[in-house]
Image (spheres, grey):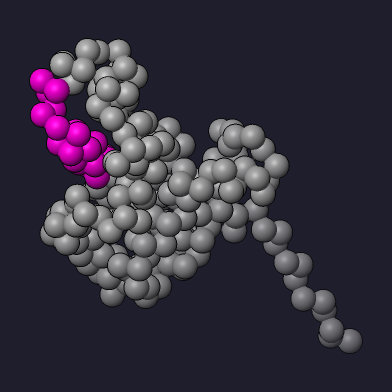
């Protein structure tokens, strides 16, 4: 039921979605849907809570004793994987934010803020220890969110520009490699692209 609701809310938004359409897509009687979720708002909030739980769980790789490159790679790959496999989830969340976060504003100001502050503190610690270059850790998260979620929220734009009807697994992997390059280089960390760069020739011997 949550998956069906996610799809309908992504397409129609909160105002346009109906419990009847969600029940039909879920393959259950409307009465059954109302048994578990008393109202459309209750169901919508359950969908949003599920999305945020999935996304925030992925930040658990960012810990003080983790290798920064490994932790950031794990996080970026997880966010890209969710954009590829659960694009409707990203679109539901984006619609909610664009319309002022009227249903989850308090959650964003409390739980999300607390999580970001804790993970940002880890990144600041890495920088203080000289393990990464100094960065604005909070805005690094905004950058990662924007870069990864664009492949779900603005998939039609990406497809139009690269000349595809839909993004393939290889397209997502290419995008993921690029986002990782941006994030890791920003933090002064090695990335796969650096390993592929040609080694410059040694300087010419000018001794006569």
- The residue at the point 15 percent across, 16 percent down is 31
The quadrant of the picture occupied by the N terminus is top left
Main secondary structure along the magenta-highlighted residues: helix
| Magenta region, residue range | 34-54
- The residue at the point 14 percent across, 57 percent down is 106
Q: Nearer the viewer, residue 37 or 54?
A: 37
Within the image, what quadrant is residue 69 found in?
Answer: bottom left
Within the image, what quadrant is residue 100 found in?
Answer: bottom left
**Looking at the image, residue 84 lies above or below residue 198:** above
183 in the magenta segment: no
- The residue at the point 60 percent across, 55 percent down is 193
**Looking at the image, residue 117 lies above or below residue 91:** below
Could you tell whether 107 is left or right of 155 in the image?
Answer: left
Could you tell whether 10 is left or right of 41 in the image?
Answer: right
The quadrant of the picture occupied by the C terminus is bottom right
Q: Nearer the viewer, residue 187 or 35?
A: 35
53 in the magenta segment: yes
Query: x, y (%) of residue 17?
Result: 31, 34
- The residue at the point 62 percent across, 43 percent down is 159
Q: Is residue 61 visible?
A: no
Q: Please give the count of numbered marks on the rendered protein.
A: 0
Query: x, y (%) of residue 43?
Result: 19, 33
Query: x, y (%) of residue 86?
Result: 39, 34
Q: Is residue 147 visible?
A: yes
Could you tell whether 24 is left or right of 173 in the image?
Answer: left
Q: Nearer the viewer, residue 35 or 191?
A: 35
């Amino acid at each position: 039921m949550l998956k069906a609701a996610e799809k309908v809310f992504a397409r129609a938004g909160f105002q346009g979605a109906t419990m009847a359409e969600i029940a039909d897509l879920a393959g259950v009687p409307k009465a059954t849907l109302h048994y578990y979720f008393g109202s459309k708002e209750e169901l919508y909030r359950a969908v949003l809570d599920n999305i945020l739980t999935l996304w925030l769980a992925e930040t658990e790789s960012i810990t003080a004793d983790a290798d920064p490159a490994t932790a950031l790679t794990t996080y970026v790959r997880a966010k890209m994987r969710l954009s590829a496999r659960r694009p409707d989830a990203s679109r539901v969340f984006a619609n909610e934010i664009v319309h002022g976060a009227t249903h989850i504003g308090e959650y964003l100001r409390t739980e999300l803020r607390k999580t970001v502050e804790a993970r940002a503190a880890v990144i600041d610690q890495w920088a203080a220890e000289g393990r990464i270059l100094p960065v604005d850790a909070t805005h690094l998260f905004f950058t990662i969110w924007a870069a990864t979620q664009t492949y779900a929220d603005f998939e039609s734009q990406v497809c139009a520009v690269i000349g595809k009807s839909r993004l393939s697994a290889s397209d997502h992997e290419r995008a993921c490699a690029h986002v990782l390059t941006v994030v890791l280089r920003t933090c002064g960390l090695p990335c796969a692209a650096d390993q592929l760069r040609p080694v410059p020739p040694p300087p010419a011997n000018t001794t006569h």
